[in-house]
Image (cartoon, grey):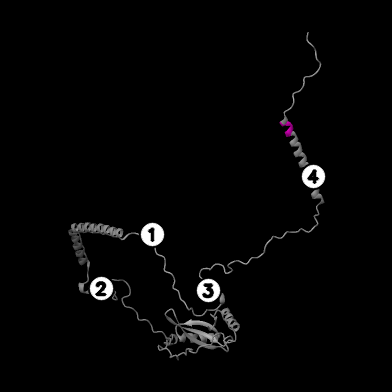
Amino acid sequence: MAVYDDGFARAASEPRSTSLVNFAGAAFSLALILGVSFWGYKLIVRDVSGIPVVRAMEGDMRVLPDNPGGGVAAHTGLSVNEVAAMGEAGGPEDRLVLAPRTAGLSPEDLDVQPAQEVISTVSAAIEDVTAGFEAEVFENETIAAPEVQDDATALAAQLAALSTEPPLAQAEAAQDPRVVPSTVPGVATSVRPVIRPANMRIPAPVAAATAAPATSEVAVTTATFPVGTNLVQLGAFPNPSLAAAEWDRLQSQFGKLMAGRERVIQVSNQSSATWYRLRASGFEDRAEARRLCAALQAEGAECIAVVVN
């Protein structure tokens, strides 16, 4: 006979790894709660009315470079740059350098360039085709020559029959194109125009004298100025007469500005040509010369302040 038991069977034990995962999740959750709580506390107790402080970086704010001059720019040392930078022309150069030669064709360009042999071959082929065409045309003209000659003879006979004037009269009319043939309709005799009354005649303009008035020779300044003398250059001309004429024009146009200035015409040999520089002297300092140039340039005249070197 079986024995009856009112109890329950013993449950199987859980694996150890499951319990470790549960403990780790609980610890992480607790740490997260503590961190969020601490962060919120810091936000609450923070003083927002305080002055923010920025920490300065260590080291020097500015450091002197090893090469303060920098790199050399292109196109430096040219006289034209001195005029734009300083406002005046520089002194004569002690060293002149010619411009570099132009670059020739590269090897790939030489390959593309047509060769002389190809040009000669094409020219010979064109001459052969032209000669053959001319020979064919000449042969055709030779065959049709009798027919053309007969047509020309018949046309000449018809023109001779229709002509009513003798050949001599026709030759004279052809020689003198001013003679109008009588067969042309219109006025046969031209009427002579009536002479205009004396009170309506327009007097002929008086011819200008062909000989130009003799101009006196312009004196060129040969004296040298001491170093540091302030001058004003008003232009460069191929002969001294033009320089003197320009000085007279400036005197008449800017009389007040040019008052107290003396004319200076100096010879300059540059670029295998002789030029005559028109300058003005009589300045106490460089500032006075620049003021005159500024006034002349405002009126549209050319002016450059220079210093004798």
The disc, 2 or 3, on the residue closer to the chain's N-terminal end is 3
Rounded to the nearest angstrom, the CA distance separating label 4 from label 3 is 73 Å
Disc 2 and disc 3 in contact, CB within 8 angstroms: no
Instruction: Tell me, yes or no, if residue 121 can be seen here.
Output: yes
Question: Which numbered disc, 2 or 3, marks the residue closer to the eye?
Answer: 3
Q: Residues within 10 Å of mark 3 (few under 14, many from 20)?
A: some
Q: From this view, report whether residue 153 is shown above or below residue 292.
A: above
Q: Circle 4 — which element?
A: helix
Q: Which residue type does callout 4 highlight?
A: Ser
125 to the left or right of 280: left
The residue that disc 3 covers is 81
Disc 1 and disc 3 in contact, CB within 8 angstroms: no
Rounded to the nearest angstrom, the CA distance separating label 1 from label 2 is 67 Å
Question: Which numbered disc, 4 or 3, marks the residue closer to the eye?
Answer: 4
- The mark found on residue 54 in the picture is none
- The mark found on residue 107 in the picture is 1
Q: Circle 1 — which element?
A: helix
The residue that disc 4 covers is 37
Q: Circle 3 — which element?
A: helix
Magenta part of the chain:
17-21
| Residue at x 54% of width, y 89% of height | 262
The disc, 1 or 3, on the residue closer to the chain's N-terminal end is 3
The residue that disc 2 covers is 174
Residue 251 shown in magenta = no
Q: Which residue type does callout 1 highlight?
A: Pro
Rounded to the nearest angstrom, the CA distance separating label 2 from label 4 is 128 Å
